[in-house]
Image: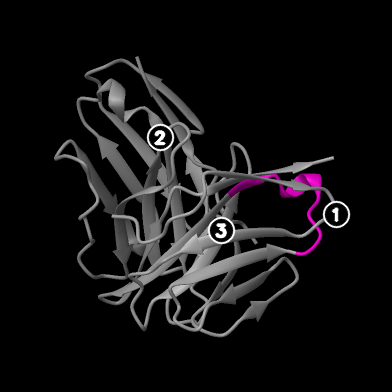
Amino acid sequence: GAGVSQSPSNKVTEKGKDVELRCDPISGHTALYWYRQSLGQGLEFLIYFQGNSAPDKSGLPSDRFSAERTGGSVSTLTIQRTQQEDSAVYLCASTMTGTHNNEQFFGPGTRLTVL
Amino acid sequence: DAKTTQPTSMDCAEGRAANLPCNHSTISGNEYVYWYRQIHSQGPQYIIHGLKNNETNEMASLIITEDRKSSTLILPHATLRDTAVYYCIVRVPTSGTYKYIFGTGTRLKVLA
């Protein structure tokens, strides 16, 4: 079946503009995660959603970052007033919780470049 | 903060076993160790996970020390396609699900 998809694959924007990044998780997966990966670095946790529970926003770096998950499926990560340090690959992952493995399935990422 | 530490990079000859170490000295009793790898420009890919027993699957083996403070991922016969960044991760239970705490990873280069 289809894996996790993300769009756009690449986004170039000017400093100060807002951007929206989209994630379509695997159907039926109840948990959805957003990570940020700066060039040559590991993955930095941003936020996760679990079912209808309030999201864990503890990793969001500033109040310019927000995320929504509508209907327990698609998620949108919004970055307002983008800065050059926001340039990174933004990765989304989903899991089916309640199983022993809880393997995270990652999407291909969105490469954001802020000029 | 990362709960794992790994060497920055390693080389391995093609056909030989690649042994990738990871320290997780602050791991708690209910926190699993996961390994993922990331090939250039792709999303991370699951390899294996374990709690305290050694584990083996078609991709790799995971050896966890008895005190659980460190582990080793073993790729038994490395190929050029195994060149990637390998992440050792601690999975932390939280309300209703888990958080995956990534370290900085080991860049493995398999040499012909």
Kind of residue at disc 2: Ser
Instruction: Give the CA distance from mark 2 to mark 3.
Output: 17 Å
Give the residue at mark 2.
Answer: A38
Give the residue at mark 1.
Answer: B15
Kind of residue at disc 1: Gly
Specify which label sits upstream in the sequence, 1 or 3. 1
Is the C-beta separation of discs 1 and 2 under 8 Å? no
Instruction: Give the CA distance from mark 1 to mark 2.
Output: 32 Å
The answer to whether residue A73 shows anywhere in this view is no
Q: Residue at x 52, y 44 (%)?
A: B8
Confirm whether the magenta stretch covers residue B79. Answer: yes
Quarter of the picture holding the N terminus of chain B: bottom left
Chain of residue at mark 3: B
Confirm whether the magenta stretch covers residue B30. Answer: no
Q: Colour mode?
A: one colour
Q: Are marks 1 and 3 on the same chain?
A: yes
